[in-house]
Amino acid sequence: MSSIIPAAVSRQPWPMLIPLFMLVLFGASVLYSAAGGSMTPFAGAHLIRFGVFLVMAAIIASLSRNFVTLLTYPAYIVGLLLLVAVEVIGTLGGGSQRWLDLGFMRLQPSELMKPIVVVTLARYYDTLPAGMIPTWRALVPAGILIGLPMALVLMQPDLGTALAIGFGGGVVMLVSGLPMRWFIMAGGAAAAAIPMAYFFLLQDYQQRRVTTFLDPESDPLGSGYHITQSKIAIGSGGFTGKGFNEGSQSHLNYLPEPHTDFVFSTMAEEWGLIGGVFVLVAFALILSWGLRVARKSKDRFAQLAAIGVTSTIFFYTAVNLMMVMGLAPVVGIPLPWMSHGGSSMMTVMICLGVLMMVNRWNRENPEGRKARY
């Protein structure tokens, strides 16, 4: 078969690409149904964006290690400047100031910072001598690299994106070998600070999301409406679902945002448990491939970058699924490769491009640079 299939085709990461293509096409069918049986305005744009960003991911995958390490810190600085620009000249949408209007598109810089922070931390720990890992030199600069974009994103306000940045950065710090007691202490401090953060840092609508998560039935027609309708849609799908394009919750406008945050609920109503299992298996295959890429890499920078972007995709997926099932507060996290939205598609495709890049490095240089732990 190696003589029949071109090398450029056979060396592609098909164990990841096949479930990815199936997931995107399935997502397009759900968006088609969410629009009442029309390719516009969701499904067609979804497929076009995926195609455009797939080309972008292929370009990222072709980059050399030296070029990426050279570009890392400048990219971080540009990302911070874009977040500052959002505060100064950003456009409003949904009560938040998160976007820059570039004319041909609306850019959400906070989405770019998710993979940028991960790769920047990977670069920092790659250059940090192993003997300094248990010292403040491994903690304080990394904390600043994570804290600055998180603070700017919280000012927008966008709690979900800030948590995603912190999660990806925290995973890189953990895998870098920082003492576990630091994470235990940080977790204890965070738990102790939750009451103060709830009353003094969260906006009123964010506070309502937390109380609604704890008791959604207390206000089923008000703050608990989203979660209540989402659970009704998921539960009514049963084992096989109501049938393609037959979802009453989304078609009768009971389900809020059926094409973005609650696209899984739209899918589950029409495709049932079978559709849900398909989505979970597809994500499991993609994420497990990302972990294998990180595990096979002998290069510390590549390892940390790969595990960081994989954890970012995992955060998107896990939080969205928990959110629509009422297991987490509604924080506006879309479902990768299924939800309608250009910024979120861009982020996960950048993460995928980084993974494909590291996979190519592993293939071309299997010995790599010795990883230091």
Image (tube, helix red, strand yellow):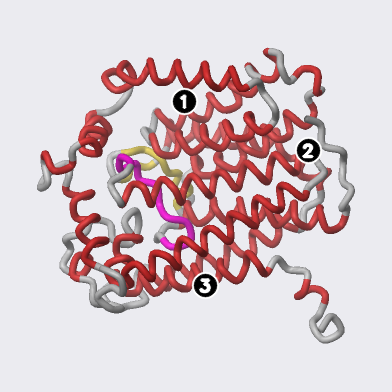
Q: Residue 331 magenta-drawn?
A: yes
Question: Looking at the image, which is closer to me, 199 or 268?
Answer: 268
Q: Dividing the image into 4 quarters, which one contains the N terminus?
A: bottom right
C-alpha span from label 1 to label 3: 37 Å
Question: Looking at the image, which is closer to me, 359 or 95?
Answer: 359
- Secondary structure mostly seen in magenta is loop
**Residue 235 versus residue 308 in the image, above or below:** below
Q: Which residue is mark 1?
A: 151
Q: Which residue is mark 2?
A: 300
Q: Is 371 situated left or right of 347 in this image?
A: right
Three-letter amino acid code at disc 1?
Ala
Query: Which is more foreground, mark 1 or mark 2?
Result: 2
The tag earlier along the polypeptide, 1 or 2, is 1
How dense is the environment of label 1, judged by Cα within 10 Å: few (below 14), some, or many (20 and up)?
some
Q: Which residue is mark 3?
A: 22
Residue 88 image position (x, y, % from top left): 43, 31
Q: Is 311 situated left or right of 138 in this image?
A: left
Q: Which residues are magenta?
A: 328-338
